[in-house]
Image (spheres, grey):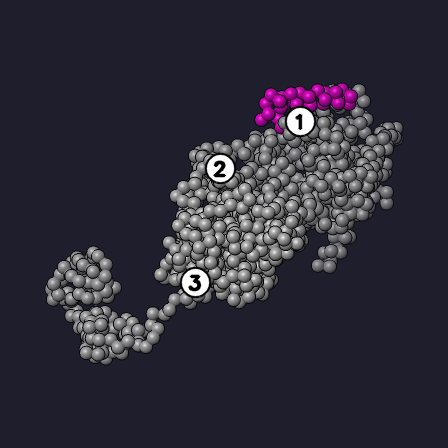
């Protein structure tokens, strides 16, 4: 056993700071999820909160193992897999659209046959797309400003994937689209194309809204529209946001302490969408700021990687994935503190939820794989 | 290549420091604003709106009758709500059909099963205004709630099935309107009355505290959060009253019948235990405006001070007896029942006085002569010409006070009217030259029925004035907490001699006087009738009267009084006006029933030496099971000779003793069951496979199948007599 552990640690490479961030996030996650699943446990397990603790703990452990395994792989391999992953992701998304399982009023999941596990296909598609875009940008650096040979091959898959995610999960699609645009910006794609793209993005978004109004079954815009209206009209936020604010205020500077959240009973899905509010309630504003700082620090570490990176793909994919992570994290936090309308995205590596957590772990794994490679280069 | 990298890095820095870092700072800033700067606002908002420590009402104590029967008790009931959003899709739709069936059949019969199903789907699917607490049913009993909790989906509990039950409680009176006004009630937005009011503190208990969650602002619906600590409410104490449910029932019924028969405006009847002053029954009935219905709308016995009229004459007599001014055999001229004082006429009620002039004082009291009494009182206490002071009048008033007539009873329920005994020369109170003669006959004084009863009770109690009480003790879970012992207000309201004479007078009223029609052979009772003018205006030769008040107050059994009782019926409109005709019969009905239930007063049937029975008086030819007959004879202490060794026996009467003779019943033929009781006959015949039909009651006198016949499975008809 000890030899195995020693072996594992011997192989543990990559940025130690990122590893530390991971572990800290995992600790926050376990604590906050355990505390906030009380009412869910009452609903589904007759009050047995340990069930969710164990389930989440197992997933978290699996996630960390996935990070470890992924980081062992040479990151160049993902470049080769990029097109294949994308080719799998697109049909899966189409399948989900038509035959997906309806959870929380949205078709975002597919049921894996036999084992009864649901899988959020968009989470996989997201990573596939980011890796693909990173590969494409780094591969086409010599003629990156060109429209036909560079811009089009990059943008077409982006549009297809985002378009397929959008009907069921508009927020995720929008965030992914934004991630890809930022990647293109960093990857030196011509600014004018990016502006054109953003322009079209807005047009398409508006189009989807209109389409959703006409055919509510095709695109789920009613909830989105409602949330947006709520955000615009109610200065203090709707019910959910008010509850989140109460939670943050309850916490004050140092928080109520682990497991002492009160607002978990009023907040809808306190273990995912509003987990930031629960963290603030239990660990105070200090805890909240620490979480933001952790994500920020992760981003800085990746930027540091990019400065050291010799190879374009590694830098690009790490950058893309960390942009995706931080956008998602900030989007989630911004909801709890009433900066944006309620979106329903999870807090990466903290919120409960198998698929989201495992693919976040996968993303971390890739980032660490890149850092491992760069470390070895520098050395 | 370096250029490329530089361009990339520049863009990365722009992204990092231009977008990501500022964003992070904004998030941190906003977190601080909400958590710290606006902290108090949001914390307060949270406290105010959703979770509060709220008081939990304690369960209210019971009000019980003397024997522990419940007069008022709190019964819990529930309002049921349903949160259709709680259940998962699978569980909701798996249970939908059965739930709809249960819903339509048990919960709301206005729904068909299909309709209920549609409704349940609607509840779940309506996104807009989706209520998380749909009212299912109000005022559901505990048993009903238990049943509804068994419905599919609902049986998954509040957090999975979505059934929400809020507990409330309702005050119930198992005996309906019985003593309603005395038991009383506490209500929102109404005056609290009765014992519920007076003992509100004891009954109410101590409220507890519990952290509760607001689930519906509009309905102010709060649900306790089970996992949070709370202070248990302390249940209120039970109140054991002096009320005897049976006597109360008799009293109310007798009074109600009289109210109906005489169509009176209101009436009251109170029964009190002589030795203790405990009120065993208190009935108050008032007519509903414009209807011939009566309800306990007001506690007349306690709250209404009235001119008592003739029933007050006892006090006048006792005053004179106490002062030694008269003996019962003294004479007084009642002037054929008509006289005048200054410009006012005084007449005797009823026709007894019309042919009489000089009679004994005793007789004057027995026929309730106003003229007689007022003449006596004015003769001894009236201000004579030449008198320098009014001490004689004062003396009369002092005597009344000596009898405790100026004292309120301080009964436990609120709203007692104070007695009015005018002071001499108190012009403000209306003292005049006419006051004394009228006071002698029970006018120009005011007493509540209960105060007057307390006075009569003192006479019955050999001069000991007891405080009337309604409450015996408070209890908690059957253990006495506070005992309210009988209270003596005055040990001796008058000398023994006066009390004894008062006794004689009251007995005379029933034996020979205005209440003689009420006399019964079964027991003796003593009392006084009253026929009081109400709304009168007196002139020289006539009196204008708006109506009468009939009353009777007394006690029974006269030799050794156990209960005292007053009946007052105000403004009877039909079938008589006199106290002896209207209130007296109510008193008799109450006294009859009470007397029957006083076991200790009845002489035992086997009192005296054992009689020697002749053979003709012995039970002969009784057929039955030996065990039964032996037990019966043993109980009656009758010797017998047992000559039988069979199950069934027959009694034979010998010259001076009883013989049990054997009675053999053949197994395979129909035996004779003549002279058997039905129980034995059934046992014997059905054991032999016969089907028994009967007619009549008593012992078997005839059987349709002859003894000795071999028969099975046939019908046999027994005639009983």
Mark nearer the N terminus (2 vs 3) = 2
State yes or no: residue A199 in magenta: yes
Can the viewer see residue B237 in this picture? Answer: no
Q: Is residue B646 above or below residue B571?
A: below
The reply to whether callout 2 and callout 1 are in contact (CB within 8 Å) is no
Residue drawn at 15 percent across, 61 percent down: B703
Q: Position of residue B166 (x, y in %)?
A: 57, 45
Chain for numbered disc 3: B
C-alpha separation, residue under disc 2 versus residue under disc 1: 64 Å
Q: Position of residue B179 (x, y in %)?
A: 50, 50
The reply to whether callout 2 and callout 3 are in contact (CB within 8 Å) is no
Residue drawn at 65 percent across, 48 percent down: B426
Mark 1 surroundings: few (<14), some (14-19) or many (≥20) residues within 10 A: some
Mark 3 surroundings: few (<14), some (14-19) or many (≥20) residues within 10 A: many
**Mark 3 vs mark 1: in front:** 3
Q: Position of residue B657 (x, y in %)?
A: 22, 78
Instruction: Say which residue label 3 marks.
Output: B557
Residue drawn at 23 percent across, 61 percent down: B698
C-alpha separation, residue under disc 3 versus residue under disc 1: 89 Å
Say which element carries label 2: loop
Instruction: Say which residue label 1 marks.
Output: A225
Helix, strand or loop: magenta stretch: helix
C-alpha separation, residue under disc 2 versus residue under disc 3: 38 Å
Q: In the drawing, does residue B52 fall left or right of residue B604? A: right
Instruction: Identify which residue, B485 or A57, lies in the foreground.
Output: B485
């Amino acid at each position: 056993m000890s030899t195995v552990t020693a072996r594992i640690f011997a192989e543990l490479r990559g940025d130690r700071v990122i590893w530390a961030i991971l572990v800290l996030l995992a600790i926050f996650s376990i604590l906050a999820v355990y505390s906030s699943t009380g009412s869910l446990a009452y609903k589904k397990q007759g009050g047995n909160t340990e069930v969710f603790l164990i389930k989440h703990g197992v997933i978290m452990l699996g996630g960390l193992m996935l990070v470890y395994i992924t980081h062992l792989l040479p990151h160049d391999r993902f470049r080769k897999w990029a097109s294949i992953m994308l080719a799998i992701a697109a049909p899966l998304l189409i399948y989900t659209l038509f035959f997906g399982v309806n959870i929380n009023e949205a078709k975002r999941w597919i049921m894996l046959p036999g084992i009864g596990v649901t899988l959020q296909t968009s989470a996989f598609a997201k990573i596939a797309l980011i890796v693909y875009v990173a590969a494409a940008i780094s591969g086409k650096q010599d003629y990156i400003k060109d429209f036909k040979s560079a811009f089009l091959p990059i943008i077409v898959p982006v549009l297809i994937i985002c378009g397929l995610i959008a009907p069921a999960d508009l927020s995720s699609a929008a965030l992914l689209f934004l991630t890809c645009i930022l990647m293109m910006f960093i990857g030196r794609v011509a600014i004018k194309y990016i502006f054109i793209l953003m322009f079209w993005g807005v047009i398409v978004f508006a189009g989807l809204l209109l389409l959703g109004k006409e055919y509510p079954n095709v695109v789920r815009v009613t909830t989105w529209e409602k949330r947006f209206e709520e955000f615009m009209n109610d200065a203090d936020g709707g019910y959910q946001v008010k509850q989140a604010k109460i939670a943050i205020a309850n916490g004050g500077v140092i928080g109520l302490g682990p497991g002492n959240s009160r607002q978990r009973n009023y907040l809808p899905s306190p273990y995912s969408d509003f987990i930031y509010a629960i963290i603030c309630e239990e660990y105070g504003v200090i805890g909240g700021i620490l979480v933001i700082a952790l994500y920020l620090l992760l981003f800085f570490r990746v930027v540091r990687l990019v400065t050291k990176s010799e190879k374009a793909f590694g830098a690009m994919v790490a950058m893309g994935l960390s942009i995706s992570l931080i956008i998602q994290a900030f989007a989630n936090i911004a909801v709890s503190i009433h900066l944006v309308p309620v979106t329903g995205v999870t807090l990466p590596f903290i919120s409960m939820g198998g698929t989201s957590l495992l693919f976040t772990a996968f993303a971390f794994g890739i980032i660490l794989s890149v850092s491992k490679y760069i470390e070895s280069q520098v050395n | 290549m370096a250029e490329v990298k530089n361009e990339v890095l520049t863009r990365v820095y722009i992204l990092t420091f231009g977008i990501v870092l500022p964003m992070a700072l904004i998030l941190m800033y906003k977190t601080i604003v909400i958590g710290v700067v606006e902290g108090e606002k949001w914390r307060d908002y949270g406290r105010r709106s959703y979770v509060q420590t709220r008081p939990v009402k304690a369960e209210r104590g019971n009000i019980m009758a003397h024997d522990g029967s419940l007069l008022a008790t709190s019964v819990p009931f529930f309002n049921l709500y349903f949160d259709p959003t709680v259940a998962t899709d699978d569980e909701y739709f798996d249970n939908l059909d059965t739930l709809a069936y249960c819903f339509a059949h048990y919960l709301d019969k206005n729904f068909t099963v299909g309709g209920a199903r549609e409704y349940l789907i609607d509840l779940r699917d309506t996104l807009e205004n989706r209520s998380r607490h749909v009212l299912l049913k109000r005022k559901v009993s505990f048993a009903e709630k238990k049943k509804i909790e068994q419905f599919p989906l609902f049986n998954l509990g509040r957090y999975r099935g979505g059934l929400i039950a809020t507990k409330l409680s309702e005050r119930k009176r198992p005996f309906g309107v019985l003593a309603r006004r005395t038991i009383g009630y506490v209500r929102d937005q109404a005056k609290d009355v009765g014992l519920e009011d007076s003992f509100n503190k004891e009954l109410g208990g101590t409220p507890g505290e519990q952290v509760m969650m607001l689930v519906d602002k509009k309905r102010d619906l709060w649900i306790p959060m089970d996992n949070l600590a709370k202070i248990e409410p302390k249940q209120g104490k039970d109140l054991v009253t002096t009320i005897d449910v049976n006597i109360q029932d008799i009293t109310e019924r007798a009074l109600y019948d009289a109210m109906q028969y005489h169509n009176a405006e209101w009436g009251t009847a109170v029964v009190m235990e002589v030795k203790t002053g405990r009120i065993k029954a208190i009935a108050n009935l008032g007519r509903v405006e414009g209807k011939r219905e009566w309800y306990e709308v007001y506690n007349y016995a306690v709250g209404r001070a009235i001119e008592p009229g003739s029933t007050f004459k006892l006090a006048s007599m006792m005053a004179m007896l106490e002062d030694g001014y008269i003996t019962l055999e003294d004479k007084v001229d009642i002037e054929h029942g008509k006289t005048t004082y200054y410009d006012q006429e005084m007449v005797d009620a009823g026709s007894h006085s019309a042919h009489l002039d000089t009679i004994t004082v005793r007789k004057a009291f027995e026929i309730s002569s106003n003229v007689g009494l007022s003449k006596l009182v004015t003769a001894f206490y009236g201000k004579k010409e030449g008198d320098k002071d009014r001490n004689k009048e004062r003396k009369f008033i002092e005597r009344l006070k000596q009898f405790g007539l100026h004292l309120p009873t301080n009964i436990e329920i609120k709203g007692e009217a104070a007695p009015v005994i005018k002071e001499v020369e108190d012009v403000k109170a209306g003292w005049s030259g006419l006051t004394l003669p009228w006071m002698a006959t029970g006018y120009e004084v005011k007493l509540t029925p209960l105060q007057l009863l307390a006075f009569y009770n003192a006479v019955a109690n050999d001069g000991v004035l007891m405080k009337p009480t309604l409450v015996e003790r408070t209890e908690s879970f059957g253990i006495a907490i506070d005992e309210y012992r009988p209270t003596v207000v005055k040990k001796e309201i008058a000398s023994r001699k006066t009390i004894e004479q008062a006794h004689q007078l009251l007995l005379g009223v029933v034996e020979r006087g205005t209440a003689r029609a009420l006399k019964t052979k079964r027991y003796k009772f003593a009392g006084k009738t009253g026929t009081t003018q109400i709304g009168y205006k007196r002139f020289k030769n006539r009196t204008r009267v708006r109506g009468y008040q009939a009353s009777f107050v007394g006690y029974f059994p006269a030799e050794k009084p156990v209960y005292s009782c007053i009946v007052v019926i105000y403004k009877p409109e039909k079938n008589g006006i006199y106290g002896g005709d209207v209130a007296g019969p109510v008193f008799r009905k109450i006294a009859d029933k009470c007397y029957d239930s006083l076991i200790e007063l009845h002489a035992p049937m086997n009192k005296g030496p054992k009689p020697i029975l002749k053979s003709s008086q012995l039970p002969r030819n009784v057929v039955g099971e030996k065990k039964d007959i032996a037990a019966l004879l043993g109980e009656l202490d009758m010797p017998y000779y047992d000559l039988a060794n069979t199950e069934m026996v027959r009694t034979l009467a010998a010259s001076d003793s009883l013989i049990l003779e054997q009675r053999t019943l053949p197994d395979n033929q129909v035996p004779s069951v003549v002279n058997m009781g039905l129980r034995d006959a059934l046992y014997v015949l059905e054991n032999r496979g016969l089907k028994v039909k009967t007619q009549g009651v008593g012992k078997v006198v005839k059987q349709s199948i002859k003894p000795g016949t071999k028969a099975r499975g046939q019908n046999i008809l027994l005639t009983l007599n």
